[in-house]
Image: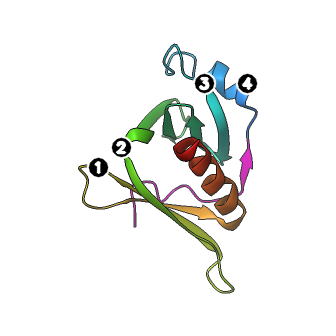
Amino acid sequence: MGLLDGLMGKASAVDTDEVNAQLEDVLAGNETVASAYKLIRDMLIFTNKRVIFMDKQGVSGKKVNYLSIPYKSVIRFEVETAGTFDTDSELRIWMSGVAEPLELELKSNLAAPVQKSLADQLFN
């Protein structure tokens, strides 16, 4: 499937102040977290400048991979909601200069808030 197939599990919204503090060394000076969703160990973060996929690796989770996608490079996105037999949702993001979309599998409870967060940042 996609790069971050591990984005599965119960997702929940995370307090943006906590995430701002946690990512203090990662965020630009004029960048703030608009919304964030915790996915077991990983996080999906929407700032006012980009989407950040925070992938904790290893047993301890001390090693972290940050994938950043600036909103200006997003061409389009697609959210597929869950069905009766397929209980997972999918997010696909197409970026300029990249032939294939980034594909993420999400639990069904995350489809609507992720779509809204992405739309809010791209269209407002």
Mark in the foreground, 4 or 3: 3
Q: Which residue is mark 3?
A: 32
Helix, strand or loop at mark 3? loop
Mark 2: amino acid: Ser
The label number, if any, that marks residue 73 in the structure image = 2
* Label 2: few (<14), some (14–19) or many (≥20) C-alpha neighbours in 10 Å: some
- Is the residue 99 above or below the residue 47 in the image? below
Give the overall secondary structure of the magenta segment.
loop
- Amino acid type, residue under disc 4 in the picture: Asp
Q: At x 69% / y 86%, what residue is drawn?
A: 84
| Gap between marks 3 and 1 measured at Cα | 24 Å
Q: Residue 17 — which label?
A: 4
Q: Give the alpha-carbon distance from disc 4 to disc 1, as whole Å.
A: 31 Å
Image x and y of residue 77, in percent: 46, 59
Q: Is residue 67 visible?
A: yes
Q: Earlier in the sequence, mark 1 or mark 2?
A: 2
- Give the mark nearer the N terminus: 4 vs 3: 4
Residue 116 at what x, y percent from top left?
65, 53
Distance, label 1 to label 2, CA atoms, is 5 Å
Horizontal relation, residue 98 to residue 36: left or right: left
Which badge, 3 or 1, is on the more N-terminal residue?
A: 3
Q: CA distance from mark 3 to mark 2?
A: 19 Å
Circle 2 — which element?
A: helix
Give whichever of 77, 1 is nearer the camera.
77
Tell me where residue 3 sits by quadrant.
bottom left
Q: Compared with residue 6, is residue 51 higher up or lower down, i.e. above or below?
A: above
The kind of secondary structure element at disc 4 is: helix
C-alpha distance separating marks 4 and 3: 9 Å
Q: Which span of residues is magenta-colored?
A: 1-13
Give the side of residue 56 with respect to residue 32, left or right: left
Mark earlier in primary sequence (4, 2): 4
Q: Nearer the viewer, mark 4 or mark 1?
A: 1
